[in-house]
Image: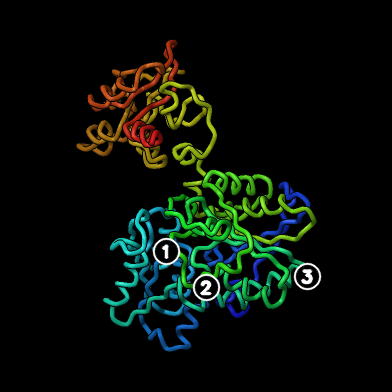
Amino acid sequence: MARDGNVLNTIGHTPLVELKNLDTGLCRLFVKLENQNPTGSIKDRIGLSMIEAAEKQGLIQPGGTLIEATAGNTGLGLALVAAQKGYKIILVIPDKMAQEKILHLRALGAVTHITRSDVGKGHPEYYQDIAERLSREIPNSFYVNQFANPANPLAHESTTGPEIWAQTQQMCDAVVVGVGSGGTLTGLGRYFARVAPHLEMVLADPKGSILEPLIERNETITPGSWLVEGIGEDFIPPNCELKYAKKAYSITDAESFLTAREVLAKEGILGGSSAGTLVAAALRYCRDQTSPKRVVTFICDSGNKYLTKMYNDYWMFEQELLPRPKHGNLIDLILRRYQEGGTVTLAATDSLLLAYRRMKLFDVSQIPVMAGEAVVGIVDESDLLLHVQADPARFSDPVSTAMVAKVETIRPDAPIADLVAVFQRDHVAVVAGADGRFIGLITKIDLLNYLRQQL
């Protein structure tokens, strides 16, 4: 229960738990569960800090509009505080952010502008530049600007750092952080430079970000791209004081996501994509040590925000981030394979209402109709619509009355060119073995995804 009944008073004071089922070498590794904050992330701390600082400075007027560029979590923290304090909020978000975050933001009352994630600072569609422009155009607005707002690192210097120091009984040797805006590194760096000068600040950086090369090799690189959300940068934010980072590790998307999944499987902790990056870097740091150390890192946000992405096997397969046997034929193009239980199917006697519900539930536009191990028909959205449009009562009709019974099958060893011919006839490719046993469907998007992977 909140101390005075206000949800804002539940921000911070998050638990610290030890990871005991992973290989940490000679070290002990602890994670601070920032996913326990009200919106499920560490950014609730800075959302509250930055808004309260602006109020004290008279930068926000009653009924005013907050504007911010955010990867999602800072926006959630700001939206929570804005809703509690009666402010409007507009958020500019790169288009690689998880839908769960965007839906959460809108449910909190935020207005969201989705922009490109493949452009850098100075481009007219870069998310920070758009937010700054909106703040100039909209009356009675305040650009929060987490990247340069001093109340961002102050939140970690005044709350997160002291909490860690107390929870470790003043026995902590290293803290592993990521950099999005730079507030965590800078705030904790300042705090521990005062109370524990021996403590090492370690950076976990997505591969493609410019920060790890700068820290480790003083190398300036052209920014790449990465799928991990919320950390990694293509510039050095004003709030980011890299001098505090004594060591840095570059972590690939695959290592980040697989580590996060391993933390869930072995430790029961559901963390987000950046948590995978931080834990992966912390494990590397721990295994590099030649003497025992106590190391702390963060579960920056909740994995509930990534259930359709990194915790979804099919999304991971699409991104080639989850190992899968290669067959060297068309089976490699099938995302949802029948023998693995991945294909949504129907029986000819099922109702068209059930077909509709499965299309909606599994977000598919066509479903194979099975008799044993063989496909006897296909029903798609057009078939369904044509059958029920004159009389919605026909949703109760069996699938057999609307399905296309003449199914065009293709063998797994057929050339890719044969797929194009099928698609030109506006059919979906039904892949079946020589014995007629169904293997899976290949759609146009499956072929496009396969071709993209060849880049």
The label on residue 46 is 2
Give the residue pinned by disc 3.
169
The residue shown at (25%, 36%) is 385
As shown in the figure, which amino acid type bears the numbered disc 2?
A: Ile
The residue shown at (35%, 70%) is 90
204 lies left or right of 194: left
Give the residue pinned by disc 1.
105
Q: Quadrant of the N terminus?
A: bottom right
Quarter of the image for residue 28 reads: bottom right
Residue 441 visible within the image: yes
Mark 1 or mark 3: name the one nearer the start of the chain.
Answer: 1
| Secondary structure type for disc 1 | helix
361 lies left or right of 290: left
Question: Is label 1 or label 3 in front?
Answer: 3
Q: Work out whether 289 lies above or below 350.
A: below
175 lies left or right of 367: right
Quarter of the image for residue 442 reads: top left
Quarter of the image for residue 205 reads: bottom right
Q: Quadrant of the C terminus?
A: top left
The x, y position of residue 137, in whole percent, is 26, 76
Which of the pair 124/88 is nearer the observer?
124
The x, y position of residue 152, in whole percent, is 52, 74
Which of the pair 9/59 is nearer the observer?
59
